[in-house]
Amino acid sequence: MSDWDTPQKILVILAHPDDPEFFCGGTLAKWALEGHEIHYLLLTCGDKGRNQHNSDIPGDELCRIRHIEQQNAANILGIKSIKFLDFEDGTLEPTMELRKFVTREIRRYTPDILVTCDPQYLFTSYGLNHPDHRAVGQVVIDALFPAAGNELFFPELAAEGFKPHMPRELWASLTAQANTVIDISSTAEIKIKALLCHNSQIGDAQAFLERFKKWRDPDSAESDPVYKEEFRVIRWQ
C-alpha cells in the first residue's frame, strides 16, 4: 500500500459530507488503525443533497444534519478533525479564489499526504459524476502544483503566516486511471458503519447493505468477498 515507516499527516479534501466514506473510507480506516493522523476539509455541507429519503428537509436543515452525520462517521473511522468551508452545494468551480482558499489550507495543515478525487472522472458506473467532485479535484490539484509550495504564488498567504508547503504524495480517489489498488476487506465493516451514519443520504439501511455487497471485487465469491479502493497516486519525494 505504501512504504511509510513513520506516522503520516493526511489531509482529505473533498466536496461533500459522505464523500470521504464513499470514495476511500476503507483506506482511511486502515490508515487510522496504523496510527496515521487524518484530517478532513470539506468544501460544502451538502445542503442540496436531495433524494427520495429526505425530500421534505429544507436545505439549511439538511446542512445541519449532514454536519452531524459526517462527524459521527469520522469518529468511527478515527479521523482527528473536520473543517467545513460551507460553500454552496452544487456551485463549486475551480476559480482562482477557491484555489487560494485551498492553498491556504494545505499550508495550514502541512500534510505529508494529500487525498482528493480525480477531476477527469466524468462517466461513472452509476451515470455522471457530480460537478462538485470534479471541481474540487481540479482546484486541489491546481493548488497543490504549482501554488502550495511556491512562495511567489499568493504571497499574501505568507504574510498571514502560511508558509509554502508541498506534500510528498497525492492520492486521487474516484478515478478511472488508477495505479494503486488497496484491499480494504479487513476494514469493509468499518466503512459500512461509517456510511450508515449518513442516514439522510442512505435511507433504508438494509437496502443499502444489499447494494454494498454488489461492490465486492467481481473475482471474489459472495461467501468470501474482497473489497478494494482504487487511486491515482503521484509521489514527489
Image (cartoon, rainbow, N blue to C red):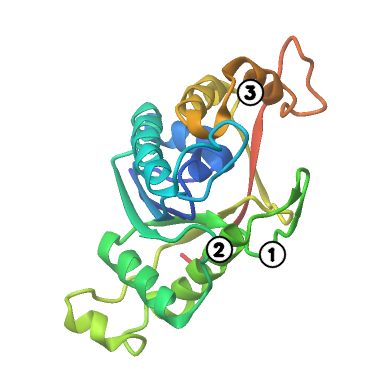
Q: Amino acid at mark 3?
A: Phe
Q: Residues within 10 Å of mark 1 (few under 14, many from 20)?
A: some
The foreground one among 221 and 67 is 67
Residue 136 sits above or below residue 197 on the image: below
Q: Determine the residue positioned at 42% across, 74% down.
A: 98
Amino acid on which the number 1 mark rests in the picture: Gln
User: Could you tell whether 231 is left or right of 68 in the image?
Assistant: right
- 121 on left or right of 59: right
Q: Position of residue 202 (x, y in %)?
A: 57, 29
Question: Where residue 33 appears, x then y in whole percent?
Answer: 39, 29
**Residue denoted by label 2:** 137
Name the residue furthest bottom.
Answer: 152
Q: Give percent across and percent down for residue 46.
A: 47, 49
Q: Residue at x 40, y 79 (%)?
A: 97
Which secondary structure, mark 3? helix
Which residue carries the number 3 mark?
208
Look at mark 1 in the image and give the residue it sits on: 120
- In the rendering, which numbered label is found on residue 74? none
Outermost residue on the front side: it is 56
